[in-house]
């Protein structure tokens, strides 16, 4: 009886540490494994900003975890009820304690945050959950089971292939086999796992897949988050040192014959991640992961540089909807296209 409870206690203890580990690894990577730079980032970077970046980058993982383990748990309960013991199996315990509204919310969240090419997989998982739940709750209603387990998946497959057929053919012509498989396989597979499997194989199969998902998913989440920007990218225009000193003191630009090479330096634009602005300096992490303390007296202007647009992997669209876009991308207003600021390219603006 203590097996599942102990495992659940360990899981609840370690689960909050996983986001913290991801945040620390992201700062460690951003500092290029320099401890002094990392400690500076920890001092100034906002924890709320880091958590916001983590949430936005990994919001897709919650539906994946809930739906995958929900399907495996319900398949185990239906196929091998004598091996479904919530006191001994963490998979069974999670299945028994997960209410239906959480599964419904996971499907809705996945529909909003998953890319179009993954929506057929979401449809497949949702139909599997509905069929397995119906067979478990209403075993004495064969008509209802037939409608939910056979008729509904077949109708969904027909509608899916009607809508996705041109995109599947386009993906095959473009040699995008992964995209074609993601669009073509799940609607057909939705018909296959709507009932129990042989009882002798159910515990091994469900627990094996659950362990595999639990091992691979953190690695995927970490790889995704380590590419997410956590600091704003800015371009800082600096005045020449001599000009800045003259502006502060109100003197002329004549430095006589004692000018140093630094005094003779011209204006420049520093590109990098803006860490913070103190009373004396603007602190920037440049492209080489070096920390630069820019005197505020030299700063002429600052501009926030937009994140570079991600190069699309696929050219396939579904009725004009790119397969790498999400529903949220289509629902939210798009920023107006404007001429990029030359300072974001590392160039000085035209003479003023």
Image (cartoon, rainbow, N blue to C red):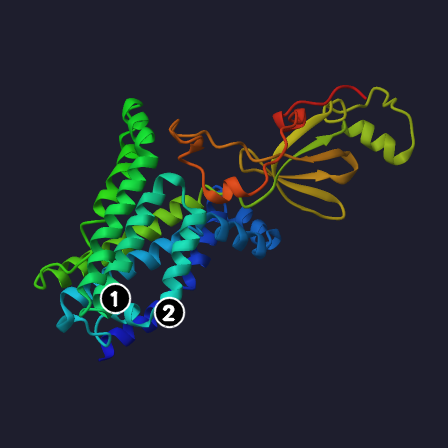
Question: What residue sits right under mark 1 in the picture?
Answer: 91
Residue 204 screen position, x and y as percent: 13, 60
Q: Residue at x 35, y 47 (%)?
A: 220
Residue closer to the observer: 11 or 28: 11
Residue 111 screen position, x and y as percent: 41, 49
Is any part of residue 73 visible from this angle? no
Q: Which residue is drawn at 40% across and 51% down?
A: 110
Does residue 112 appear left or right of residue 193 in this picture? Answer: right
Instruction: Give the answer, above or below, for where 108 lies relative to 200.
Output: above
Helix, strand or loop at label 1? It is helix
Name the image quarter holding residue 47.
bottom right
Residue 167 screen position, x and y as percent: 34, 30
Marks counted in the figure total: 2
Q: Which residue lies furthest to the front in this view?
A: 143
Residue closer to the observer: 69 or 295: 69
Q: Which residue is drawn at 32% across and 51% down?
A: 217
Instruction: Give the answer, above or below, for where 255 lies relative to 118.
Output: above
Near mark 1 (Cα within 10 A), the count class, few <14, some 14-19 or many ≥20, is many
Near mark 2 (Cα within 10 A), the count class, few <14, some 14-19 or many ≥20, is few
First in sequence: mark 2 vs mark 1: 2
Does residue 87 appear left or right of residue 230 in this picture? Answer: left
Question: What residue sits right under mark 2 in the picture?
Answer: 12
Residue closer to the observer: 172 or 27: 172
């Amino acid at each position: 009886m203590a097996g599942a409870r102990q495992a659940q206690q360990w899981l609840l203890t370690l689960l909050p540490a996983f986001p913290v580990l991801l945040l620390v690894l992201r700062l460690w990577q951003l500092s290029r494994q320099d401890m002094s730079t990392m400690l500076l980032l920890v001092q100034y970077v906002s924890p709320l900003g880091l958590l916001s970046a983590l949430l936005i980058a990994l919001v897709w993982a919650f539906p994946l975890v809930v739906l995958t383990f929900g399907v495996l748990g319900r398949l185990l309960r239906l196929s091998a009820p004598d091996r479904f013991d919530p006191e001994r199996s963490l998979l069974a315990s999670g299945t028994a304690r997960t209410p239906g509204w959480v599964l419904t919310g996971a499907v809705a969240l996945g529909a909003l945050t998953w890319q179009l090419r993954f929506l057929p997989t979401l449809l497949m998982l949702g139909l599997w959950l509905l069929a397995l739940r119906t067979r478990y709750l209403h075993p004495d209603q064969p008509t209802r089971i037939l409608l939910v387990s056979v008729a509904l998946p077949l109708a969904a497959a027909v509608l899916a292939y009607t809508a996705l057929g041109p995109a599947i053919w386009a993906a095959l012509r473009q040699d995008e086999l992964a995209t074609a498989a993601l669009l073509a396989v799940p609607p057909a597979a939705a018909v296959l796992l709507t009932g129990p499997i042989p009882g002798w194989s159910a515990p091994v199969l469900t627990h094996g897949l659950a362990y595999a998902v639990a091992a691979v998913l953190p690695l995927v989440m970490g790889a995704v988050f380590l590419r997410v920007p956590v600091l704003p990218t800015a371009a800082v225009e600096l005045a020449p040192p001599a000009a800045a000193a003259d502006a502060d003191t109100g003197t002329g630009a004549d430095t006589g014959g004692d000018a140093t090479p630094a005094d003779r330096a011209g204006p420049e634009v520093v590109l990098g991640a803006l860490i913070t602005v103190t009373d004396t300096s603007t602190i920037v992490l440049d492209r080489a992961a070096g920390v630069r303390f820019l005197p505020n007296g030299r700063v002429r202007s600052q501009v926030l540089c937009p994140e570079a647009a991600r190069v699309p992997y696929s050219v396939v669209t579904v009725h004009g909807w790119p397969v790498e876009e999400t529903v949220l991308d289509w629902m939210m207003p798009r920023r107006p296209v404007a001429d990029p600021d030359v300072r974001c390219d590392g160039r000085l603006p035209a003479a003023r």
